[in-house]
Image (cartoon, rainbow, N blue to C red):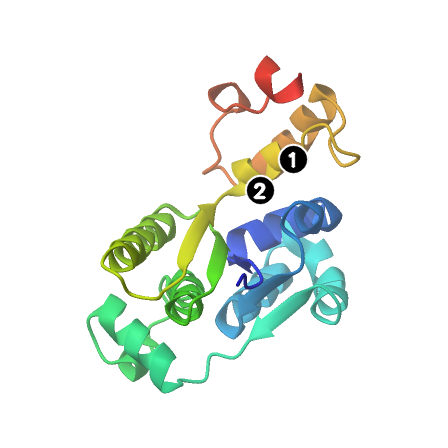
Amino acid sequence: MSSRPIIDAGPSLNFLSINKERLLIGVLGKLSTPETVEAEVLRKAHADRRFKAVTATWGKLTRSCIQVLSDDLTPELAAVISRIAEMPAEQRLKTPKDLGELMVVAHAVVAAERGDVVTVLIDDGAGARLAAAEKRRLDRSRRAGRQVGGISLVSTLTVLEGAAKTEHLPDRGAMRETYLRLRGLDDGLPPIERTRLLEPALWT
């Protein structure tokens, strides 16, 4: 069984700021995100003019295409957070640093533990490493015979590759323009020449 992909704040802000939410949903389908991430997205959209467009779009999307996941501490969610953070979940939730990434991964793990296959969209390096570590743990559990699902980790680059040759990015020119706009918002993205986004194999 598959759950909705769970998206982190960075990709949410970036794609929505350049009005590419249809591209994002066209590749991944309807999405979900934790309450903590929603709060981070709206806070940054109000505070930073680069993300101003997100404010108007977010409410429309949460009524149709983005499900906001409750961060209330169910026993399952609390157990995952406590294990990953190596401290009681209630204590970890009081520390805002990297909390959005943690909640994305924690929600994904809870869904995977009940048997779902969950896609996680996260660009943050530490968050991606955490998601990858949990993916490997679940893979080991499955090989050991436990009835668990899994995590599929994707990034902004993965989404853009999936959109190549579609109505959203019909040619290399559209890809380059979109990527440069995204990189203008997120200097963590590498130069396009260091990606696969312009390679002939992607466009043939």
Q: Position of residue 21 (x, y in %)?
A: 71, 50
Judged from the image, the secondary structure of the residue bearing numbered disc 1 is: helix
Position of 10 compared to 153: left or right?
right
Position of 89 compared to 104: left or right?
left
Query: Between residues 59 and 105, which one lies in front from this camera angle?
Result: 105
Q: Residues within 10 Å of mark 1 (few under 14, many from 20)?
A: some
Q: Which image quadrant is residue 57 in?
A: bottom right
Position of 73 compared to 146: left or right?
right
According to the image, label 1 marks what residue?
181
> From what the image shows, is residue 76 above or below residue 32?
below
Q: Which image quadrant is residue 104 in?
A: bottom left
Residue located at (22% from left, 58% from top): 144
Q: Position of residue 101 (x, y in %)?
A: 41, 60
Position of 121 compared to 198: left or right?
left
For residue 19, say whether it is visible. Answer: no
> From what the image shows, is residue 2 above or below residue 36?
above
Q: Label 2 is placed on what type of residue?
A: Leu
Residue located at (63% from left, 70% from top): 67
Q: Residue furthest front?
A: 145
Q: Label 1 is placed on what type of residue?
A: Arg
According to the image, label 2 marks what residue?
185
Q: Position of residue 195 (x, y in %)?
A: 50, 24
Judged from the image, the secondary structure of the residue bearing numbered disc 2 is: helix
Query: Between residues 164 and 16, which one lies in front from this camera angle?
Result: 164
Q: Position of residue 157 (x, y in %)?
A: 53, 36
For residue 143, say whether it is visible. Answer: yes
Q: Which mark is residue 140?
A: none
- Find out whether the residues at labels 1 and 2 contact each other: C-beta distance under 8 Å: yes
